[in-house]
Amino acid sequence: MSTQTHSFTDAEKQLLIVVATLQSRGRPADRPTIEAFGRDYFGMYAGDWSNAYTSLVNAGLLIVAGDCYRIAPQIQALAEQYCRDNPKHRFFYDEFFTRVEHSKAHATFCERVYGANLAQHGMLEMPQLDELLDVLALKPGDEVLELGCGNGMLAEYISDGTQACVTGIDSSAAGIAQATARTSGKRSRLKFIAGNMLEVAFPSTTFDAVIAVDTLYYAADLPQFLNRLAATLKPGGQMGLFYSAWLAEGEPKELLRADQTALGKALRQLELPYKAIDYSAHELAHWHKKLQVARELRADFEAEGNLFLYNKRAIEAEYHQPYVATGNVSRYLYHVQME
């Protein structure tokens, strides 16, 4: 059947995304694996795929070989496009921001870990944010782009404190919807866009500053992406980029240096002038605190029916403990000042 004559349902699209992703990773796409991976991929947004298996197989768009499924060649490119348009992290953050909006437990978690509740998910504690604002010295009316703004609470905090005009972009439709609704009375200086930050396409010399807080890890080609960002800056524009590095076992410690992280190397390759502020000691303490606080608040998360949030915060912190134990982590604020 031609894809032009098949109108794909949301369930069929989800099924194709999962099978294509498993296929790209060389993993078997048998039904139990598909179902388990799909629940993890889409979370609360996973649909009922019972009929999707049958309809796609009958249409010749999904091929069964033994007990495994694979994408038919004629829709391979389409399935890959669905994957690019619907990255796994988008669904995680949609659920994350949907849940944190009304979670007192998560608000308390943020206050105790970060110093204030801005619905944070990364590693930015308030003293680091305050130093970022000191370094950038934003003025009223400055145009600022925040990459990966989530539900916009950080952008709002920055704009409220500086009167700068902040544009936030994020792939989470749920986060952007919250940001837009919450800041409706501040539209003259706050704007939010739902979209892939890696495909950002703003005119040159648009912004006075670009801010990226723990979001540049998603860029597959970091030098190319940074080059595009630099082009959006006005003469004398700035970038404030928070970036952490983790070493795999056996990698040399020198890779933790500011000039040797992936971001540091990309900035040097592009000959973009920067200064790096070292927060590595804070990073080590951060992961200890994050795990401790999450465990202390487990009962509060459970009482809300928000073990999803507890599990994500606790599992993330547990994952980083071996890096912390060996000191194989570093963190920097890279301040780029254009000429």
Image: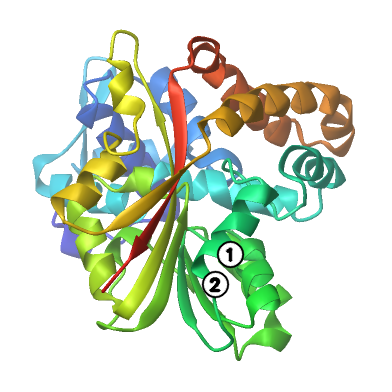
Q: How many marks?
A: 2
Amino acid type at mark 1: Leu
Question: Compared with residue 141, is residue 10 higher up or lower down, i.e. above or below?
Answer: above
Residue, disc 1: 133
| Label pair 2/1, CB-CB below 8 angstroms | yes
Horizontal side, residue 105 vs residue 184: left or right: right
Image spot of residue 92 (x, y percent): 54, 43
Horizontal side, residue 66 vs residue 133: left or right: left
Between 57 and 116, which is closer to the camera in this rendering? 116
Q: In which quarter of the image is the C terminus?
A: bottom left
Residue, disc 2: 137
Kindly state the secondary structure of the residue where label 1 is placed. helix
Identify the residue at horizontal 34%, vertical 31% (top origin).
Answer: 257
Instruction: Kindly indicate the quadrant of the structure image that contains residue 330.
Output: top left
Instruction: Kindly indicate the quadrant of the structure image that contains residue 56.
Output: top left
Question: Compared with residue 138, is residue 212 higher up or lower down, i.e. above or below?
Answer: above
Distance of label 2 from label 1 (alpha carbons): 6 Å
Identify the residue at horizontal 30%, vertical 47% (top origin).
Answer: 83
Identify the residue at horizontal 67%, vertical 49% (top origin).
Answer: 127
Kindly state the secondary structure of the residue where label 2 is placed. loop
Image spot of residue 246 (x, y percent): 40, 25
Q: Which mark is residue 70?
A: none
Image spot of residue 159 (x, y percent): 63, 76
Mark 2 residue crowding within 10 angstroms, few (<14) / some (14–19) / many (20+) = few
